[in-house]
Amino acid sequence: MAARFVLHHHPQSRAQRIKWLLEETGADYEIVLHDLEGGTHKRPDFLKLNPDGKLPTLIDRGPDGTAEVAVTESAAIVIHVADCCPEAGLAPAPGSVERGPYLTWITYAAAALEPAFSDVMFPRAEPAPARAVGWPPFDKALERVLGGLTPGPWLVGDRFTAADLMIGALLGWLNAWGKLPEPDRFTPYLDRIAARPAYRRAYPG
């Protein structure tokens, strides 16, 4: 039977963290590699899957291989795949007390950290009124992550979850790009992430 998951991917995109996610699950998956310079993610056939023309986009064929459902947006993909592969232990069970913090951190990466960093890279002519944006300043968002890692070692206590994958991939990318302020504060966390076999398979460089 064909692999359940098909990942539309480019290594210099957010799709790389979904490749790491799939490696963590141990699930079979296929890669459809895109040429960003050539604009393959903007072609009509791909826009039928994701009208925004963005990576990552994941196709889920279902457990019996008879479906073909597109899942877009990293946070949604991470939640979906972790729930589809409970044997990997990447997600607290629905209804558990850990589920709320877990979902909070996954969505915090997309809803707060990323837009706050965009504000740093593309500053407005004048600061937006605090009531006009739904995220804190970048430095405050990073402080919240540091608080979430205390006592740690992971965001949901002593268990690595897909929340660490979502936050950790972003922090690692910022660090590699030289855009993570005071990176030594995050070194122990990033070292724990880099030691994971699935991470090394997804990021062999």
Image (cartoon, helix red, strand yellow):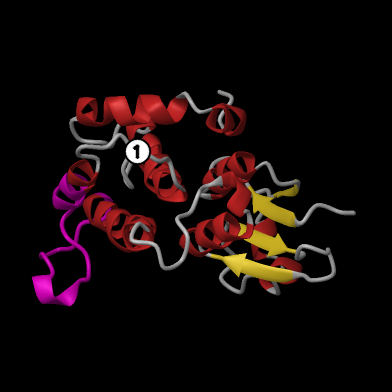
**Relative side of 147 to 24, left or right:** left
Q: Is residue 172 above or below residue 191?
A: below
- Residue 52: which quarter of the image? bottom right
190 w.r.t. 21: above or below: above
Task: Please tell me whether residue 204 belongs to the stretch shown in magenta.
Answer: no
Residue visible at 17% across and 44% down in the picture? 147
Residue nearer the viewer, 96 or 77: 96
Residue occupying the point 57% across, 40% down: 20
Residue 136 falls inside the magenta stretch: yes
Depth check: give the residue in front, 153 or 28: 153
Q: From the image, tell me which residue sits under label 1.
A: 158
Name the residue furthest right: 1
Instruction: State the image coordinates of residue 10 (x, y, percent, origin top left).
Output: 62, 45
Helix, strand or loop at disc 1?
A: loop
Counting labels gives: 1
Image position, residue 45 (x, y; %): 76, 69
User: Which amino acid lies under the numbered mark 1 shown in the image of this protein?
Assistant: Asp
In the rendered image, the vertical position of residue 164 relative to residue 75, given as above or below: above
Instruction: Check disc 1: other Cα within 10 Å, few if <14, some if 14-19, many if 20+.
Output: few
Which residue sits at x=31%, y=43%?
Answer: 157
Residue 69 placement (x, y as % from top left): 71, 71
What span is colored magenta in the figure?
121-144
Please tell me which residue is depicted at 40% across the width and 41% down the height of the picture.
Answer: 159
In this orientation, does residue 87 appear? yes
Which image quadrant: the C terminus?
Answer: top right
Quarter of the image with the N terminus in it: bottom right
Residue nearer the viewer, 117 or 94: 94
